[in-house]
């Protein structure tokens, strides 16, 4: 038995997978240090594993936590993991013998008009009724001499690991999307409130100009300009309200509930969350182990490599063993398990696609082309990942600069408005100048809210691009080699290996 098991292990034909190691820059172009820190906040560096509490908004944290528990996309991703787990278990079961039990009982009434019936009918004591009973224990085992089944297991294992990484990627995306939408809600609410204040200011300004126009102290041009400005501000409110309602509906769907479920809770205005301090995300090479979408892409490449071996194994003969042990009788069921009714058999089978090599060649080329596609996809995904980080860092820095400039402008216009109000109290200027100062201040405040909103969204984009939102725990060598076994009954944990530093990708065919 040991010899058979040794022979069945055989030699796995096809390429042995070598994980590609893309060349990565040492640092990010946009990581100047200043782009990472948000002065004026008392928050510590955000934890990449759970970054949403760093915004200091308990409601934001609540919604992200709720979404991670009941989001529909996460439920789909979890189901895909279960499918891949079942596929891995099925592939592993193919290496074990298949054992089955079969039993049957039959009763027939023999025709005497057939040649056989005429012969039997001429025999003394012929009974046209006949019974047959049979019970067998059978076993079959395909010996994996050339490793085709082992390659199938490797492919299924890589698919399973990739599905787990895909689920982590969905979790990351859901957390980022819910936080991004929440910040959009708060930003829109702030802008609507400013627009409503602008409407009141414009209405007061229009009233003053109308009064002066009636007295012949203002031109019709001034009056119509004031009317147009009021209409413009009023028209912006419905657009913002529609965007706000759409964002709230999107929040509900991401939370796995019907639109409107959390509207009352969200309708209470809250300020745009403060920017967290974003600690170092490491070097670009860390993305290879931090971003689950890159891990999933690398696992797809490993699976495609293993499937080349599955195709190559078709060049070689398939050897199988089968056996049967049972009992059969046509006399009575009482004789079924007697010595005379015993039956047994053993078979050695051989299947070889000896004259089908042209089709096998095509299957191998197809598998190799799939591997080439997966490799190109992995390399492209790595480039896109670094691009996302660079863009997020740049956007965060520029938006913060914009917010700082608008904050300085708002401070200057606040002092100008106070000065005009003081001058109005002394009778030096008219109320029109005060209202115009109010209008200028509110315009800058609206821009400042937009900049704050986009800064917070850029911070979320940084966390997402860096792979924040899950914990890449240390794992067994499965992800490092792509070949070591991962038990199907244990959740997979991704490798926390040192970041690769050289460019290489290779296979070795036996």
Image (cartoon, rainbow, N blue to C red):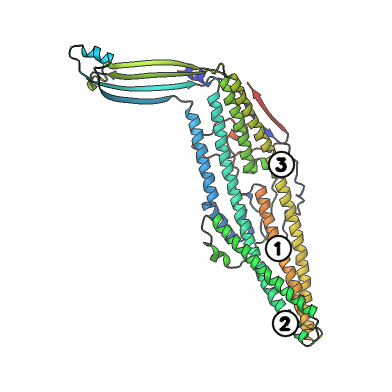
Query: Which of the pair 74/277 is nearer the observer?
Result: 74
Residue under circle 3? Answer: 383
Spatial CA span between label 3 and label 2: 58 Å
Of helix, strand and loop, which one carries label 2?
helix
Figure quadrant of residue 15 = top right
Quickly name the residue at label 2. 207
Going by the image, does 17 lie left or right of 139? right
Query: Cβ–Cβ below 8 Å for labels 1 and 2?
Result: no
Residue 450 is tagged as 1
Please tell me whether residue 96 is drawn above or below residue 21 in the rendered image.
above
Residue depicted at x 73% and y 54%: 395
* Residue 58 in sight: no
Which image quadrant: the N terminus?
top left
Q: Position of residue 343 (x, y in %)?
A: 32, 16
Could you tell me residue 489's position as x and y percent? 48, 37
| Residue beneath the point at 56% across and 40% down | 163
Q: In which quarter of the image is the C terminus?
A: top right
Sooner in the amino-acid sequence: mark 3 or mark 2: 2
Q: Which residue is drawn at 48% across and 32% down?
A: 90
Seen at 77% across and 59% down, the residue is 401
**Among the two numbered marks 1 and 2 on one chain, the one whose residue lies closer to the N terminus:** 2
Is label 1 in a helix, a strand or a loop? helix
């Amino acid at each position: 038995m040991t010899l058979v098991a040794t022979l069945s292990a055989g030699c796995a034909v096809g390429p042995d997978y070598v994980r590609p190691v893309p060349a990565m820059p040492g640092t990010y172009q946009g990581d100047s240090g200043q782009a990472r820190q948000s002065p004026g906040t008392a928050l510590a560096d955000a934890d990449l594993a759970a970054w949403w509490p760093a915004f200091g908004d308990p409601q934001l944290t609540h919604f992200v936590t709720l979404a991670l528990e009941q989001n529909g996309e996460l439920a789909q991703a979890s189901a895909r993991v279960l499918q891949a787990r079942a596929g891995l278990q099925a592939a592993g079961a193919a290496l074990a013998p298949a054992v089955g039990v079969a039993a049957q009982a039959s009763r027939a009434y023999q025709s005497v008009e057939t040649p056989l019936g005429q012969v039997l009918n001429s025999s003394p004591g012929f009974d046209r009724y006949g019974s047959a009973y049979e019970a067998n224990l059978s076993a079959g085992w395909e010996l994996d001499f050339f490793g085709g089944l082992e390659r199938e297991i490797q492919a299924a294992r890589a698919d399973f690991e990739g599905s787990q990484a895909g689920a982590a990627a969905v979790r990351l995306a859901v957390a980022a999307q819910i936080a991004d939408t929440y910040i959009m809600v708060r930003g829109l609410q702030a802008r609507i409130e400013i627009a409503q204040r602008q409407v009141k200011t414009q209405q007061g300004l229009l009233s003053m100009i109308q009064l002066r126009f009636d007295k012949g102290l203002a031109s019709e041009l001034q009056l119509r300009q004031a009317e147009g400005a009021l209409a413009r501000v009023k028209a912006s409110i419905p657009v913002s309200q529609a965007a706000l309602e759409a964002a709230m509906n999107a929040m509900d769907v991401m939370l796995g509930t019907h639109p409107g479920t959390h509207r009352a809770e969200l309708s209470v205005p809250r300020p745009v969350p403060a920017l967290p301090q974003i600690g170092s995300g490491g070097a670009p090479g860390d993305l290879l182990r931090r971003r689950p979408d890159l891990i999933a892409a690398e696992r797809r490449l490993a699976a495609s490599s293993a499937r080349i071996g599955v195709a190559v194994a078709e060049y070689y003969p398939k050897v199988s063993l089968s056996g049967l042990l049972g009992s059969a009788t046509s006399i009575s069921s009482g004789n079924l398990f007697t010595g005379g009714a015993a039956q047994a058999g053993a078979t050695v089978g051989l299947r070889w696609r000896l004259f089908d090599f042209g089709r096998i060649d095509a299957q191998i080329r197809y598998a190799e082309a799939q591997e080439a596609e997966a490799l190109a996809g992995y390399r492209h995904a790595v480039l896109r990942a670094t691009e996302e980080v660079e863009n997020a860092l740049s956007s965060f820095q520029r938006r913060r600069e914009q917010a700082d400039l608008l904050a300085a402008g708002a401070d200057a216009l606040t002092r100008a408005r106070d000065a005009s109000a003081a001058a109005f109290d002394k009778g030096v200027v008219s109320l029109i100048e005060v209202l115009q100062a109010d209008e200028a201040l509110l315009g800058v405040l609206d821009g400042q809210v937009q900049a704050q909103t986009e800064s917070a969204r850029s911070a979320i984009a940084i966390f997402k691009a860096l792979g924040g939102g899950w914990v890449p725990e240390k794992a067994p060598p499965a992800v490092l080699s792509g070949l070591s076994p991962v038990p199907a009954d244990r959740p997979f944990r991704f490798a926390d290996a040192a970041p690769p530093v050289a460019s290489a990708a290779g296979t070795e065919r036996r």
